[in-house]
């Protein structure tokens, strides 16, 4: 393989759109991923064990584990927003044209 075999395509800013998902679905998937990442970061900042996080978030420890591992397919946007709020974040939805 040489440099002539390499092609670089600029990202749209949404990896899910770049992967070929429907634009509407790609936006929801992007939001879910962002909320999941920020919530997992918040749990780490709090220094909670997974068991502590489970109690505070009102979910099981295995669900906390899936959240931390980024298993986005296991969580709806609604649930992720609920967990973010329980973790002390203040989710907001902003729409633009």
Image (spheres, grey):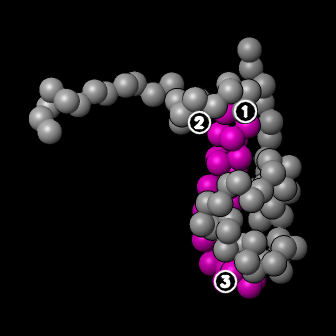
In the displayed structure image, the side of residue 49 where residue 95 appears, left or right: right
Residue lying farthest to the top in this orientation:
97
Which label is found at residue 25? 1
Along the line of sight, which residue is nearer the eye, 5 or 81? 5
The residue positioned 51% from the left and 25% from the top of the image is 12
Find disc 2 in the rendering and name its residue: 16
**Structural distance between the alpha carbons of marks 1 and 2:** 8 Å
Along the line of sight, which residue is nearer the eye, 36 or 20? 20
The residue positioned 69% from the left and 81% from the top of the image is 50
Q: Magenta segment, which residues?
A: 26-53
Q: Tell whether label 2 touches label 1 (CB within 8 Å).
A: yes
Residue at disc 3, secondary structure = loop
User: The N terminus lies in which quarter of the figure?
Assistant: top left
Find disc 3 in the rendering and name its residue: 49
**Structural distance between the alpha carbons of marks 2 and 3:** 31 Å
**Structural distance between the alpha carbons of marks 3 and 1:** 33 Å
Residue 89: % across, % down: 76, 56
Residue 10: % across, % down: 40, 24
Work out whether 81 lies above or below 3.
below
Residue 51: % across, % down: 74, 85
Q: Is residue 38 magenta?
A: yes
In the displayed structure image, the side of residue 40 where residue 85 appears, left or right: right
Near mark 1 (Cα within 10 A), the count class, few <14, some 14-19 or many ≥20, is few
Residue 83: % across, % down: 81, 61
Near mark 2 (Cα within 10 A), the count class, few <14, some 14-19 or many ≥20, is some
Q: Nearer the viewer's eye, disc 2 or disc 3?
A: 2
The mark nearer the N terminus, 2 or 3, is 2
């Amino acid at each position: 393989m040489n440099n002539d075999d390499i092609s670089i395509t600029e990202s749209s800013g949404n990896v899910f759109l770049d992967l070929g998902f429907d634009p509407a679905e790609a936006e929801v998937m992007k939001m879910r991923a962002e909320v999941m990442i920020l919530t997992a970061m918040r749990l780490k900042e709090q220094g909670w064990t997974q068991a502590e996080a489970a109690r505070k978030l009102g979910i099981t420890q295995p669900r906390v584990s899936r959240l931390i591992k980024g298993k986005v397919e296991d969580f709806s946007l609604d649930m992720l927003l609920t967990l973010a709020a329980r973790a002390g974040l203040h989710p907001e939805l902003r729409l633009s044209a």
